[in-house]
Amino acid sequence: MIRIWAKLVRDDKIIKDTIYENPAVFNIDNFYNYITDIAESLQIATPITLSKHLNYFMDFNTTTYLPSDFPETIDFDKFVLEQANI
């Protein structure tokens, strides 16, 4: 089962968050699909995912997207994804 805690952060405070759950086994090849689902549930644009985001998530169970990773202007400072343990 996949559980990812997604947070929108502004001025070092969480302004919105959600827990994404998927019954499937985690697969890095589907990471973009997870991000798309999470962004849709938070009603934000899907960020541009680079290899650094994948590597950080795989190595440290967390990754951060900054405003420069979004194709649109956003009203938060960071979009943080963190693997949530059961």
Image: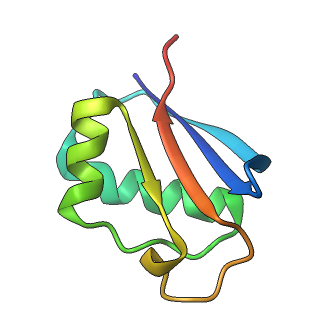
Name the residue located 49 percent from the left edge and 15 percent from the top edge.
Answer: 85
Q: Residue at x 50, y 67 (%)?
A: 66
**Left or right placement of residue 36 versus residue 11 in this view:** left
34 relative to 59 in the view: left or right: right
Q: Position of residue 80 (x, y in %)?
A: 54, 49
Q: Is residue 70 above or below residue 42?
A: below
Decide which of 58, 10 is in the foreground and name it. Answer: 10
Q: Quadrant of residue 53?
A: bottom left
Q: How is the image coloured?
A: rainbow
Work out which quarter of the rendered image holds the N terminus and state it.
Answer: top left
Q: Is residue 25 above or below residue 80?
A: above
Left or right: 17 with respect to 20? right
Spot the residue most to the front: 11
Residue 51 in percent (x, y) is at: 18, 60
Location of residue 3 in the rendering, given as x and y in whole percent from the top left corner: 49, 28
Q: Which residue is located at x 30 percent, y 51 percent?
A: 31
- Residue 47 picture location, percent across and down: 45, 71
Marks counted in the figure total 0
Furthest toward the top, the residue is: 86
Closer to the camera in the image, 78 or 5: 78
* Rendered residue at 20%/46% (across/down): 55
Q: Quadrant of residue 35?
A: bottom left
